[in-house]
Image (tube, rainbow, N blue to C red):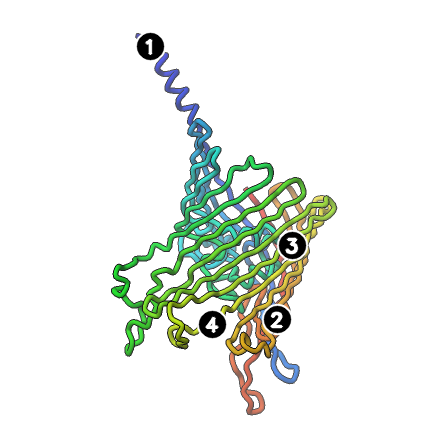
Amino acid sequence: MRKSLVALAALTMAGVASAQSSVTVFGVVDAAVSGYSNKSEMPLGTSITASSTRLTNSGYTPSRLGFRGIEDLGGGLAAGFWLESSLGNDDGTTGGNVANSGPAVIGFFNRRSTVSLSGAFGEVRLGRDFTPTYLNDIIFDPMGAAGVGANIIYNANGGFGPVSPGGFTANSMYARASNSIGYFLPSNLEGFYGQVLYALNEKTSYEPGALTPPGAGAFIANPSAAGDNARAGRYIGGRVGYANGPVDVAFAYAQSTLASNFFAGTTQTLDIWNLGGSWDFGVVKLFGEYSNNKLKNDSSSNVVNSVTNPFAFREPGANGWLLGGTVPVGPGLIRFSYSAIKYNNTTRINQLTGLFAEPKADKWALGYVHNLSKRTALYATVARISNSDGAGLAVGGPNFYTTPITVGGVRFTPQASTSAGYDFGIRHAF
């Protein structure tokens, strides 16, 4: 009897050992003294400057607190989870919209919240995760899309909040998508990698569609004119790349449904595609990226209606690019980049005639990171954006002063001009 009990205990322990699991607590605490100076131009060479000095977070690496775990299920299968929250260590906040965490999301685990199953087939993830197009923006930016030096593509896509100052359009699915189903190729494909992501909008649909309730704030004279947004919130995208030795290159595409109106028969989507790459030569690692954004408005009617379809026959867009690099210097790293963006089809008349200059902006950034250890680093970054023809992008900080004022009896509207800033900080990872 005793031998039987010992054998049973041994089998039980073996079963526990075959299903090993581990849980890791990890994070980054990054704090910096940051200064901003955003200048608006007035006639006759005068200007108005909005400036501030702040203690910020995420100047080099986004601050975060996370928990991740994996369980070996045997037979090559593993289950895992990843819960990660933005951390505002400068004022003690967590989750929500802290500095450089992307569009505002109310919730604790706002950076990533997934459960997954992986094996020889790859990995399937469920939950809130990074979008494929956003990964190219941060991976192929020597500044890591953090702090004042983040590339201008990140600025224009709303990386600093719900609507970045002078940004292209409000897109809550730019950096991350909630309610998503993702698939990742296995890692044994001789350098090739890829992923697809589909996010459900979780909206209610009606059949017959004519019974779809109008949205809030409908016009009293025409209750059905308000958008119902029954299709808004859907995201579909993918990314494919190749990494081997010093070379890494990837292409990504995504479509986000931003708004819809059943009664007007319109759907507004944002299409993004980008191509990025890097090449490590040892003495210098070079980065490059090109990004194309287009706001599309599909309509079931060919009738131009400025109320229900204000973007009829017009697809405004933005094209951006970046070149940059990193240079290792002893225990440190020099970082530099130059990026630019140009808007197009911003007005119907410009689409038809092309007579007026389209808004554009460019940005340079320079930084140095001094590694005190593998986990702790001191850093300094400076950056400057130049806006022209109506663009209004900022490195961060206060909004440009654009309130109309009267000078000499004439009313003027200040125009965003330049934005400059710096970060001096410390980063500790654990």
Q: Residue at x 61, y 52 (%)?
A: 276
Q: What whole-number distance in Å separates the C-alpha atoms at marks 2 and 1?
A: 80 Å
Q: Residue at x 51, y 40 (%)?
A: 185
Name the residue carrying label 3. Answer: 288
Q: Compared with residue 427, is residue 43 higher up or lower down, i.e. above or below?
A: below
Q: Along the horizontal axis of the image, is 205 left or right of 275?
A: left
Q: Residues within 10 Å of mark 3 (few under 14, many from 20)?
A: many
Q: Residues within 10 Å of mark 4 (few under 14, many from 20)?
A: some
Q: Quadrant of the C terminus?
A: top right
Contact between marks 2 and 4 (CB within 8 A): the answer is no
Q: Is label 2 or label 3 in front?
A: 3
Name the residue carrying label 4. Answer: 313
Q: Amino acid at mark 2?
A: Asn
Q: Is label 2 or label 4 in front?
A: 4
Q: What whole-number distance in Å separates the C-alpha atoms at marks 1 and 3?
A: 66 Å
Image coordinates for residue 412, horizontal then vertical, percent: 55, 84
Q: Earlier in the sequence, mark 1 or mark 3?
A: 1
Residue 387 - label: 2
Q: Residues within 10 Å of mark 2 (few under 14, many from 20)?
A: many
Contact between marks 4 and 3 (CB within 8 A): the answer is no
Q: Earlier in the sequence, mark 4 or mark 3?
A: 3
Image coordinates for residue 126, horizontal then vertical, percent: 41, 44
